[in-house]
Amino acid sequence: MAGRQDTKTKILDTAELLFAEHGFNETSLRTITSRAGVNLASVNYHYGDKKSLVRAVLSRYLEAFMPQLRAELDVLMTRDEFTMEEVFLCLKAPLLSLNAFRRNGAAIFMQLLGRGYTDVQGHLRWFIVTRYQDVLSLFTTAVCRANPALDPETLFWRLHFTLGACVFTMASSKALSEIAASDFGRSAETEDIFDRLVPYLAAGVGAEVDQELAVINQRTINAG
């Protein structure tokens, strides 16, 4: 039993590193088995196919992240009023805790999420939305309560812009920290970077809607 578990973990660890570095599309099962030192039959036995392996890799992080996020949001939602910054701060502890779960866990998690979009892994998005619908819905509700002026379409775009900014910033946190240290002589830990990111995200999501719609409408008129 221990041997089977070791093989399963070895496959998962190897796939995680390769997926984060090269992407889901560019990483073949043959590459994973070669790097892990196992045969293809082992992957098929433990995970069935590549899609299931992709989900298993991300699930390790999601199972640690989502319950903590739910707990943070539950506390926030007991209040009558809160700001957009406070909504995004609910992500802080769950995300940073991934560094204790896995070395550089926060960065790897965000890399994997980003790969899910850039590699057009529709099955992965379906998996996340279906399995964690309650947490994602609660987060969206919190955003809407903090800024009730957001219409559904604007909310869609702004949350995806937010995801993009989070993925780039947190996945590149080590490089950004080194650049900042070189340019300004001050090191920045992952927590410092996140604290700088939150006001930016809050301002973007909470930006005035009427002005944005006016620009889009004028562009539509000009195109017509």
Image (cartoon, rainbow, N blue to C red):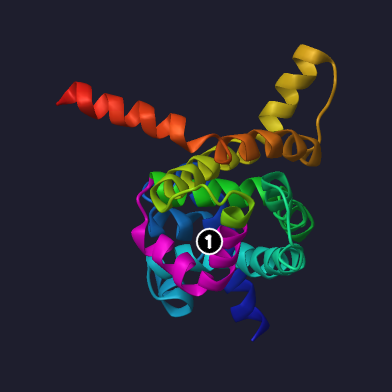
Tell me the residue at 64%/40% (across/down). Answer: 202
Residue 120 position within the rendered picture, expressed as x and y whole percent measured from the top left: 35, 50
Residue 6 sits in quarter: bottom right
Q: Quadrant of the N terminus?
A: bottom right
Residue 125 sits in quarter: bottom left
Residue 80 position within the rendered picture, expressed as x and y whole percent measured from the top left: 74, 62
- Find the residue positioned furthest to the right: 186
Vertical arrangement, residue 201 with respect to residue 27, above or below = above
Q: Residues within 10 Å of mark 1 (few under 14, many from 20)?
A: few
In front here: 41 or 61? Answer: 61
- Residue 11 visible in the displayed image: no
Magenta: predominant secondary structure element? helix
- Give amino acid for label 1: Gly
Q: Secondary structure at mark 1?
A: loop
Tell me the residue at 52%/51% (across/down). Answer: 113
- Residue 129: say if magenta: yes
In front here: 217 or 7? Answer: 217
- Residue 92 visible in the displayed image: yes
Residue 206 position within the rendered picture, expressed as x and y whole percent measured from the top left: 58, 40
Number of numbered discs on residues = 1
Residue 18 position within the rendered picture, expressed as x and y whole percent measured from the top left: 51, 49
Q: Is residue 38 left or right of residue 70?
A: left
Q: Which residue is mark 1?
A: 37
In front here: 224 or 182? Answer: 224
Vertical arrangement, residue 37 with respect to residue 177, above or below = below
Which range is magenta?
A: 119-142
- Find the residue positioned furthest to the bottom: 1
Vertical arrangement, residue 109 with respect to residue 176, above or below = below
Q: Quadrant of the C terminus?
A: top left
- Residue 40: say if magenta: no
